[in-house]
Image (tube, helix red, strand yellow):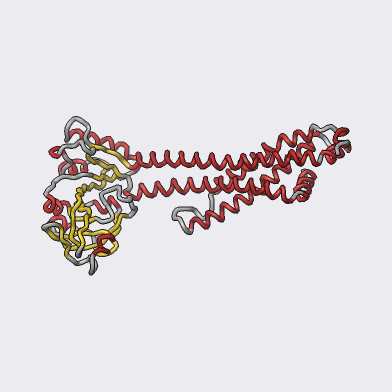
Amino acid sequence: MKEAIAFALDALAREKLKSFLTVLGMSVGCCALVLVIMVATAGRTYITALIEGIGANLVIVEREPGVAALQDELSAGDLGALRSLPNIVAAAGSYDNPLELQIGTRKVVARLVGVTEDFQKIRNLRILRGRYFDAEDFSKLNKVCLVTSSVNRRLRHGAVGNELKLGDSSCTIIGIFEEGISTFGQSEIQNETILLPYRVARIITGDSYFQVIYLQVAKHDDIDFATQQVKLVVASRHRSRPRYLVRNMTELLYLAEKTTIGLTGILLGVSIVCLVTAGVGIMNIMFATVTERTYEIGLRKALGASERAIRTQFLTEAALLSAFGAAIGVLTGTALSYFGSSIIPNIPSIPSALSIIGATVFTMAVGIAFGYLPAQRAAKLQPVDSLRHE
C-alpha cells in the first residue's frame, strides 16, 4: 500500500493541471453536500423554533372561515369550559377587527385586538416599553391599550402615556409590544395593531365573541390527548356540524418537517449531480492516464507486478483525488458556513460532524466507483502489447 500511495502521488504530481481540475470538481460537489446537510439541519431547527416561539404546546380553536353563524360563535363560556380541562395550564381568547384611526393628520387602518388575561403568556409577547395589562385593567375595564412599534413611530410625541383616539372612544397607551417570534402577519398581530382588554374592546366594537381561543398544555406529550378533549368540548357546546377548527403546533411542525425534507431532497439531488459529474471527470482523466502510461504498466507487469497491484495503484490515485477534493470541499463549506452565520441567524458557524463525515464518505465512494473501470482496464493490459505501445 505504501508503494501504491507513493506511485499515485508521483503520478498526480506529474500531471498537476489535470489533477487540480479534477480535485476542483470533486471539491465543489463535496462543498455542496456539506452546505446542503448543514442548511437542512439549521432550517429544521429554525422553523421548529419559529413555530414553538408562537407559543409552546398550543392547541388553537378558531371558527371555520365563512361557516360559523354569528349566533354560534366562540364565547366566554367556551373559554371557561376549555380552561377547566385537565392538562390545560393557560387559556386566552382574542377578538380582532380593523379600525380606522386618526393619528396626527393621517388616517390609518389598524388592527384592534381584544385579549384576555393569559394572552401575553401564551403568545410570548415582548414588552419593549411600558407595561402589559394588570389584573385591575381587566377587572375595572380601564381604557388602556398597547401598540406596536409601527403605530408608535406614527405618533408625533411618542406613544406611552398619550391618549389614542379609537372612533368615538379613546384609550391611554401604557406600553409598546411585539411578537416574541414574528408570524409575519399570519395571526391577529399585524404591523399596526392596538391591544386592549377584551371587555373594553367589546364596548368599542359592540361584538361579544372570540375569533380564536388559545390553550396551553402542560406537557408536550399530552398535546394530542388535550386536542381530542378540546374537540369534544367544542362539539358538545355548538351545532352538530363541524364549524370550528381545532389544531395544535404538532401538526404545523409535521408539515414544516415534510417541507424541509422535500427541499433537502431536491438540494441533495443537485449536489449528487455535481459529484457524479466530477466522478465522470475522474473516470475520463483516469482512462487518459491509463492510455498515456501503457508502457509503464507493461514494464511493471513484466517485472512481476500482479493485476491486483496495478488495480490498487490506479484506485489509490482515484481515492487520493477524491480525498483531496473532499478536504478542500469541507474546508470551503466550513468557511462559507462561518461567513453565512454572521449574516443569517440560526446558521451554525461550523458544519456538524454528520455533514462532514457524510460528505467525505460519499465523495470518496464516488471517486473510487468511477475510478474502478480505468483501474480494471489497466490491470487487464497484456505486458507484451503494453511494452510495444508507442
Name the one closer to the observer, 92 or 345: 345
- Quadrant of the rendered image containing residue 142: bottom left
Residue 233 visible, this angle: no
Q: Residue at x 21, y 47 (%)?
A: 93
Toward the top, the furthest residue is: 240
Tally the marks: 0
Q: Is residue 154 visible?
A: yes
Specify whether 314 is left or right of 26.
right
Locate residue 185, reporting x and y percent.
Answer: 30, 50
Image quarter where the C terminus lies is top right
Q: Quadrant of residue 147?
A: bottom left
Residue 117: percent from left, percent from top: 20, 52
Q: Is residue 287 left or right of residue 60?
A: right
Q: Position of residue 190 (x, y in %)?
A: 27, 53
Quarter occupied by the N terminus: top right
The quarter holding residue 307 reads top right
Q: Nearer the viewer, residue 152 or 251?
A: 152
Left or right: 176 with respect to 368?
left
Asked if residue 224 lies left or right of residue 76, the reply is right
> Picture coordinates of residue 191 (x, y %)?
28, 55
